[in-house]
Amino acid sequence: MENYYVTTPIYYVNDEPHLGHIYTTIAADVLARHQRMSERDVFFLTGVDEHGQKVQQAAEKRGIAPIELADQVVERYQSLWPELQISNDDFIRTSSDRHKAGVQAMWRRLENAGAIYKDFYEDWYCVPCEAYWTETQLKDADCWDAKHCPDCKRAVEKIQEESYFFRLSAFQDRLIEHIKANPDFIAPASRRNEVLSFVESGLRDLSISRTTFSWGVPVPGDDKHVIYVWIDALTNYLSALGFPEPEQPAHWPADVHLIGKDILRFHAVYWPAMLMAVELPLPKRIFAHGWWTVEGEKMSKSKGNALRPAELLEKYEADVLRYFLLREVPFGQDGDFSFTSLKQRYNTELANDVGNLLNRSLAMLNKYRDGVLGAVAEESEADRALIADVEAMQREVAACMDKQAFHLALERINAVVRHGNRYVEDNAPWSLAKQGENARLDSVLYHLVETLRLVALQLLPFMPEKMTAMLGQILNRKVQADNFSFSADGGWGVLAAGHQCRKPEPLFPRMD
RNA sequence: GGCGCUUUAGCUCAGUCGGUUAGAGCAGCGGAAUCAUAAUCCGCGUGUCCGGGGUUCGAGUCCCUGAAGCGCCA
């Protein structure tokens, strides 16, 4: 079986879960579920980044140990994921022993490869932002006199410390070569351009250790130093797979790292360079998605308009959120979360189109045929067109998923649903029933139910609960989302004549 | 300041290699049907394709230039 490895970033425990976190994780989940249905050996990883000065200071402020603070926030993530139907195979914590072992092994291998050296580091640091600023950056931002952070305007501290460095500059040419030779390595294309121009403008070596705080993984053989965020956090993608035992885990390299655009450089430049240094294969793809605004406004703490996942889940079912987030905005672009728009998509696409097609089809099957599917005597032109459309949808959705084009996949599925509704009008089963044309009636109803079944199968990764319910109505048995595969269930004609369907129950009741 | 991207119907956007009347969804207007969650289906768009210049038999699609917005870097 072919492997498939998909990751989210590890989320920083200084932050409560918000819309951006659930967005990335839902996207990863949909990919994982789709690939499992395509019978690939899927490993879907998410987790948390617990280390760093910010967490250490926040914990001190509250008078608790960093690990206690981390435990509290970790709990929020770990209880949230099941509610959103997230099917991750593992959850990595950077405070875990297995991760620390992986990070220290990574460090040693970088060291053995001659990619690490010790020097002095001098810079200006903003603690709240965890950002370093050079003197020129402060001057350019007109912040030099006041000595404050160009981002948050709070005070920056001068920092000079002994530090280990990673020879990032040594990998500049190979990175450029790799990005150019692999057009799909960084997506979307606009991000790829940005990374390329960043690398081409010249890379500086990277400071990779700190002596100013202790909450992290110690540098092997030099306990004064803690390994700084890059090597610590990025190595999670390997440590979760057991690295360094084996040195190249079976699921490596990752098929896709899903990330927010804010951490693109770390994933598309630092991480590949590190992997080059230790001679491991690079991830096949890095996809940076966009940001959400809420009702047209940027989310921020001061505005208090950040959407809390727990509150959203009180208002909407997980599947509805999953659908909306991936349908509303092309993955990779920024988008706006508005309740009006969510309701409109729900009512038009889910309630009116999918839900109602299911409902009217099963209602007619029950009304005219006691819920029992008949045989298809003769295929009409319209029947063949419908089948061809369903099969084209299956191919095209698979292609979309390979490109993380969720919105296009959903649009394509919706097109089949609309075709189904048109097919109902064109063939008017109610007239066939009235005129006693039972052979044709059976055939039309069969094509509808089979179309619905295959539509549900394609939507299953997006809306596991809703589609389980839909398949339950069609198949008339208790079903589980992870028992379906495209090869076993995806063919046209799996349902046999004589099959009994349930009476319909509204799947997506209209919102007011 | 450098590099890049975007600007197409009321709204959100699609338009591959330049080639017949520039498309989709939503919203709006009109009609049909009645199986259904009053849902569905059909019909209806004379849009300065941001402005200006150019290349070409022909440009939304290529080149130059200007404007507005955005991103990355400095």
Image (cartoon, grey):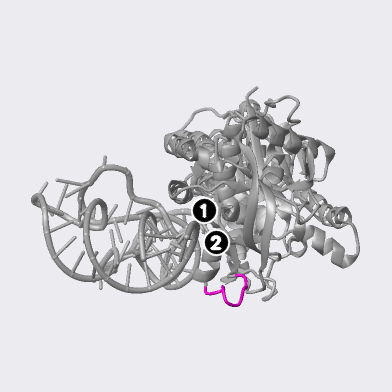
Left or right side of A415 for A79: right
Q: In this image, A133 relative to A187: left or right? A: right
Q: Residues within 10 Å of mark 1 (few under 14, many from 20)?
A: some
Which of these two is toward me, A21 or A275?
Answer: A275
Q: Position of residue A278 (x, y in %)?
A: 62, 31
Figure quadrant of the N terminus of chain A: top right
Quarter holding residue A73? bottom right
- Kindly identify which chain the residue marked by label 2 belongs to: A
Residue depicted at x 69% and y 55%: A161
Q: Identity of the amino acid at label 1? A: Pro
1 and 2 marks in contact (CB < 8 Å): yes
Secondary element at tag 1: loop
Q: Is residue A245 left or right of residue A405?
A: right
Q: In x, y percent, where is residue A262?
A: 59, 56
Residue at 76% of width from left, 26% of height from top? Answer: A245
Q: Amino acid at mark 2?
A: Gly
Residue that appears at 46% across and 48% down: A202
Q: Position of residue A246 (x, y in %)?
A: 73, 24
Q: Secondary structure at mark 2?
A: strand
Residue B36 position by quadrant: bottom right
Q: Which mark is residue A330?
A: 1
Identify the magenta region: A142-149
Q: Is residue A472 magenta?
A: no
Which comes sooner in the sequence, label 1 or label 2?
Answer: 1
Residue occupying image coordinates x 89% and y 57%: A65
The secondary structure making up most of the magenta span is loop
Q: Which residue is mark 2?
A: A335
Mark 2: give few (<14), some (14-19) or many (20+) Cα within 10 Å.
some
